[in-house]
Amino acid sequence: MYSSDQVQRLQKLSTSLLSLVSKSTPLDDRLEELRDVLRFNEYRYAILNDPLISDFEYDTLYKALEKIEAARPDMVTPDSPTQRVASGLTKEFPTVQHLVPMLSLENSYNEEDLLDWDRKARELSGLEELEYCIEPKFDGASISLTYENDRLLRGVTRGDGVAGDEITTNIKQIRSVPLSANISRYGLQLVEIRGEVLMNKNSFKKYNEQLAEQNLPPLANPRNAAAGSLRIKDPKEVSRRNLEAFLYHVAYFTTLDGAQVTDGHVEGTDETTADLHINKALKTHSGSLQMLWDLGFRSPQKEKRVVKGIQAVIDYCHEFEKGRDDLPYEIDGMVIKVNDFALQDKMGMTTHHPRWAIAFKFKARQATSTLRRVEFQVGRTGSVTPVAKIDPVPLSGVTVSSISLFNEDVVREKDLKIGDQVLVERAGDVIPYIVKPLAEVRTGKETPIIFPTECPVCSHKLEKPEGEAVWRCVNINCPAQVVERIIHFASKDAMDIRSFGDANVRKFYELGFLKDVPGIYRLPYDKIRELEGFGEKSVGNLQAAIETSRQQPLHRLIFGLGIRYVGETTAKTLAAAVSHLRDFAGFSLEDLQNLEDVGPKVGASVYQFFHNPDNLHLLDELEGLGLNLKSQKSTASAGGNLDGQTFLFTGTLSRLKRSDAEEMVEKNGGKLLSGVSSKLNYLVVGEDAGSKLEKAKKITSIQILTEDEFIKLIS
């Protein structure tokens, strides 16, 4: 549709207009250019699914056009982006028309926008104060579900708002979407429900880990992962992605006695008798959310809040934004709706959005910047990670200037070059990613990213093990690896040496006070006291923390040694398998793989570690410094009420910390497993449980417990 020259011109024009808007420069004389830019970016987003600007930047340009047209109605044209829902469709699936068009929401980014919208809403309703329902604005892929005679009839993507792609088979792979729902209990024959499909942060992380194991590039963010999944032609692959769906809007329904209701507007019956045809649950938006919840849908019933007055709305939006990163899923704002459906009907809609709803968007997580250079950092296992250095850009309240590029394969897959304009995003765990380069706006001055053949720290030749995507420095005495190993050894989940963070480790290493892990226990405290910022109290605290760490249990030491693939749970398994840590030098590979949850990859890594003379010398040195290398199995746990039973936790616990719950299991004689298998006795399930729960349901010998049932079992 657009030639390369047009793409280049329109992208530059986008940047130019955004700059003018940020400076509050009037754009009245550039109206057609503004419309052209918006049409172009709609096409990139809706047709190609390949946006060149962020959602925030698009909304900024859209609101600029709205402002001009509001002031000059005579300038509005039928083909203006403000006069339609969205652009066309890709034709990968059959096209189905929605029973009711899926309109966009008006967006706001500050309190002033909300106050102005509230004023207009009160004028339209004729009331001095309105009741609002507030719920999260999920950052996923919009869908429309139709149920008829209590059964799922079809699932459709949003598409252009009027019609979408029919994806019923894929929708059925999402377990939070019921295949049947007792809508007739509410007097309904047919209902169209709107919602959002998403991949939660935990599922996204695990799926990317699976891709990494297959040497495939990771997905950029959960939203793209969800949207792309809906169009996959293999339903089994859709199921593997562990998607979920929130349903939050009853757009249309017909009653068993013939009434038709569209967003609260009753047709097919006399308006004076309308109340007879609408169930009480469907007279308010909050009531409809409760109905959806009761029918077995995952509606934002727990997250919603019903308030009176716009100030309460503003307060809740800010409150929710503060906890945004603690949620198990991505949201990019809040949606505010007039709660009463009769008032919604009275207020009506524009051609683009309903007047009774607005979205309050949180601070942007996506922006554009320039890739200036790439630095190569060496980790504790020798992995060499390319790190992009970009022009600093604000994202969600922080300024981002450094972004991990993971490995060489990712750089090649994304086709990144020095000097590229890049689209940057913060993912669910608040880690920034480069989504893609804006290749269409390259000038020809961009240069390739050259990977080093030698370690950037010690100059040792790099190696790339077969089957791995990462280049490694195999020199274990490489200064960068040494420092990272010391930092890991002292970390909270390992030896927990407080007051000994990254900065102090690096400082002491540079000064020559520290050269390896055993050196932690030989620090020259008299020299440290002479350093600026190290008073008697801080040095005393550091010394006390180091002394205390000598008696940490064996599993913490094992984890602190940084053996590849050995996490906290595996470290506990290993600690329970020996009387003394050096005993592993006598274990064969088969002996190791016979241990609980130790597979070939972990077993090979542990075997190599304990058959390396340098590592055995390290253990002897640590024991000579007073560290505990003996197993401290508690005799009190033997014969406990969980003796011999195996446990695994999944989801978020509401009453206990995960670490406390696991400790309770061990103190009562139970064992912890790291995955679901036939060896598992109990799976304890918290909120937002994922694939482990579904897998456990298929193994009849596993007993599934709620958190309360677990606490009762313990006591």
Image (tube, rainbow, N blue to C red):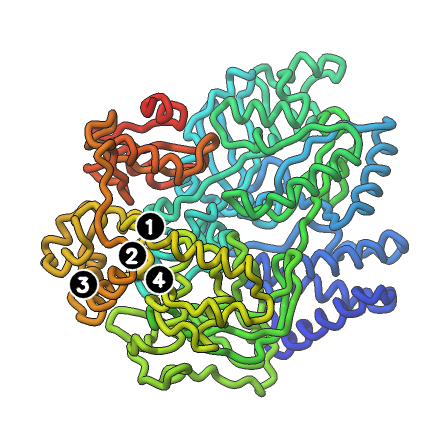
The residue lying toward the viewer, choosing from 241 and 626, is 626
Figure quadrant of the C terminus: top left
Local secondary structure at mark 2: loop
Local secondary structure at mark 1: loop
| Residue 595 sits above or below residue 152 on the image | below
Q: Amino acid at mark 4?
A: Ala
| Residue 7 sits above or below residue 694 on the image | below
Q: Amino acid at mark 3?
A: Phe
Mark 1 touches mark 2? (CB < 8 Å): yes
- Is residue 36 found left or right of 385 in the rendered image? right
Mark 1 touches mark 4? (CB < 8 Å): no
Per the model, the C-alpha gap separating discs 1 and 2 is 8 Å
Disc 4 target residue: 212
Task: Point out the frontmost of discs 4 and 2.
Answer: 2
Q: Amino acid at mark 1?
A: Gln
Q: Measuring 49% from the left and 45% from the top, which residue is drawn there? A: 198
Task: Point out the frontmost of discs 4 and 3.
Answer: 3
Per the model, the C-alpha gap separating discs 1 and 4 is 33 Å
Q: Earlier in the sequence, mark 1 or mark 2?
A: 1
Disc 3 target residue: 610
Q: Which mark is residue 627?
A: 2
Could you tell me if residue 409 is visible in this image?
no
Disc 1 target residue: 552
Local secondary structure at mark 4: helix
Per the model, the C-alpha gap separating discs 4 and 3 is 27 Å
Q: Amino acid at mark 2?
A: Leu
* Pointer 1 local density, CA inside 10 Å: few below 14, some 14–19, many at least 20: some
